Amino acid sequence: MFELLEPKVRTRKAPNLLLHCGANRVEREEVQEVETPFATETWTPIPHIDLICRVERTLRINGLEIGTQAHSLSHDGNRYFGLMEIQRSGSEDDYTWVLGLRNSHDKTFPAGIVAGMTVFVCDNLSFSGEVKLARKHTRFIIRDLPMLVQSAVGRLMNRWHHQDERLVAYRESPLDDKTAHDLVIRSTDVGVCPNQLIPRVLREWREPRHSEFEERNIWSLFNAFTEALKGNLVELPKRTEALHGLMDNHVGLAGMTVVE
């Protein structure tokens, strides 16, 4: 059993964890108390808390801090879902990444890790994000888990450097109302924004509720979109991906690739 590490306390709301198929939000200690079934010749379950602690340890080794967390259990503790915010140690980034975890003791799905700026973790078994890994509960899962977790974190760090460059480009790209309106209309063509949300995006662009986005640039428009779209967790990952494509093309980053 890994040492149970206390997460850092942050003055932020817990990550959005969508629960609608019988899962219950629980405290970390309740996850630790869940009993793990005995292994068989072909199936080796791992404790939910071991997956959490392994991920936390790897994050810290890689210079990442863990912020707020959310945990849930369903089916008498046999299925675990969780989210945690992560940030680079000592950084003053005005954004964070989110890492999602899931694990099962009833052979329903493999142990999984998903990470990105937009992540959807749902107890109806939908699981998507920008960096994704899964490992079946077979004989060597305990041996392979450290390498898999490190691989996921390494891919996340690579994405993070790419994201830094993207945000600099967004902030340094001035934007007038006419061009902003054109991008909003074009966003409907690429599946980012349904017609009924256009007024909400424009309202956030014209009168941003956060002073950080009063500057007239692509970054402010991007946040106007994300503010308007954040209510639909099911659609958010693919809409955000399409939004990045639209914005990247506008600022000249469309040809950039991320090597993983």
Image: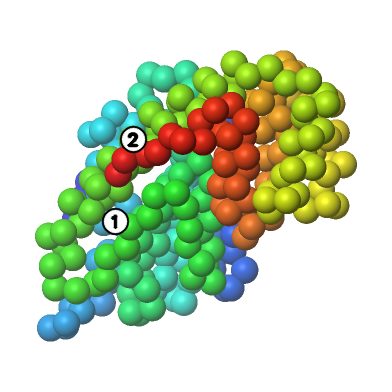
Under circle 2, the secondary element is helix
Q: Residue at x 35, y 79 (%)?
A: 106
| Residue 28 seen from this side | no
Nearer to me, 22 or 245: 245
Q: In the current view of this chain or complex, which residue is farthest to the bottom?
A: 41
* Residue 188: x %, y % from top left: 75, 49
The reply, left or right, for residue 256 in relation to residue 179 is left
Q: Which residue is mark 1?
A: 51
Instruction: Answer few, some or many: residues within 10 Å of disc 2's Cα (few below 14, many 20 plus, some between 14 and 19).
Output: some
From what the image shows, is residue 158 above or below residue 174?
Answer: below
Q: Quadrant of residue 14?
A: top right
Ranked by sequence position, the earlier of labels 2 and 1 is 1
The reply, left or right, for residue 33 in relation to residue 171 is left
From what the image shows, is residue 188 above or below residue 109?
Answer: above
* Residue 176: x %, y % from top left: 78, 20
Q: Are marks 2 and 1 in contact (CB under 8 Å)?
A: no
Q: Residue at x 41, y 70 (%)?
A: 79
Q: What amino acid is found at the position of numbered circle 2 in the picture? A: Met
Q: Which mark is residue 157?
A: 2
| CA distance for labels 2 and 1 | 20 Å
* Residue 232: x %, y % from top left: 69, 55
Between circles 2 and 1, the one closer to the viewer is 2
Q: Residue at x 62, y 31 (%)?
A: 250
From what the image shows, is residue 192 above or below residue 77?
Answer: above
Which quadrant: the N terminus? bottom left
